[in-house]
């Protein structure tokens, strides 16, 4: 038997969750804009440090074209930094362009590392 008050509570929880999600999304977008890396043409994952072995391997696995684009963005950002300027607004990285292009590769490398460790510990 389904109690009507439970249905009502479930609907309220869903609304509260969507409100929380909207607040989180707004805060996340604001934080990304304040970080400033978009003003020099970088994507979020361009900031990952290559000294991390997982990131280095993930970058190595990127398609050549994506590696070239990443290198171009980093060089252009370095140039802006040295000149103490920002790009024209039409060249800023737009939120819809700031995709997570490196994360799938990092996850795959991490998964393979875990599998390798499990195999070696058998």
Image: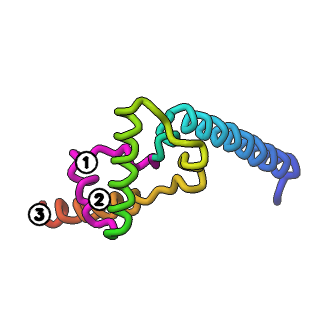
Q: Mark 3 = which residue?
A: 120
Dot 1 surroundings within 10 Å: few (below 14), some, or many (20 or more)?
A: few
Q: Mark 2 = which residue?
A: 59
Q: Are marks 2 and 3 in contact (CB under 8 Å)?
A: no
Q: Quadrant of the C terminus?
A: bottom left
Q: Quadrant of residue 103?
A: bottom left
In primary-sequence order, the first of circles 2 and 3 is 2
Front-lying residue, 122 or 28? 28
Q: Is residue 19 left or right of residue 40?
A: right
> Magenta stretch: dominant SS?
helix
Q: Are marks 2 and 1 in contact (CB under 8 Å)?
A: yes
In the rendered structure, find residue 50 and report the number of the disc placed on it.
1
In the displayed structure, 32 sits above or below 60; it is: above
Q: Residue at x 52, y 39 (%)?
A: 39
Residue 108 location in percent, x, y? 33, 64
In the rendered structure, find residue 6 and report the number of the disc placed on it.
none
Q: Which residues are magenta?
A: 42-62
């Amino acid at each position: 038997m389904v109690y009507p008050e439970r249905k009502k509570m479930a609907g309220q929880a869903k609304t509260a969750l969507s409100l929380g999600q909207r607040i989180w999304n707004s805060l996340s977008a604001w934080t990304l804009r304040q970080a400033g890396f978009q003003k020099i043409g970088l994507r979020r994952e361009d900031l990952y440090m290559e000294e991390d072995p997982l990131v280095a391997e993930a970058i190595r696995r990127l398609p050549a074209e994506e590696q070239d684009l990443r290198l171009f963005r980093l060089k252009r950002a370095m140039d802006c930094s040295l000149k103490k300027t920002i790009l024209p607004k039409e060249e800023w990285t737009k939120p819809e362009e700031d995709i997570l292009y490196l994360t799938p590769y990092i996850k795959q490398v991490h998964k393979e590392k875990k599998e390798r460790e499990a195999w070696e510990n058998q």
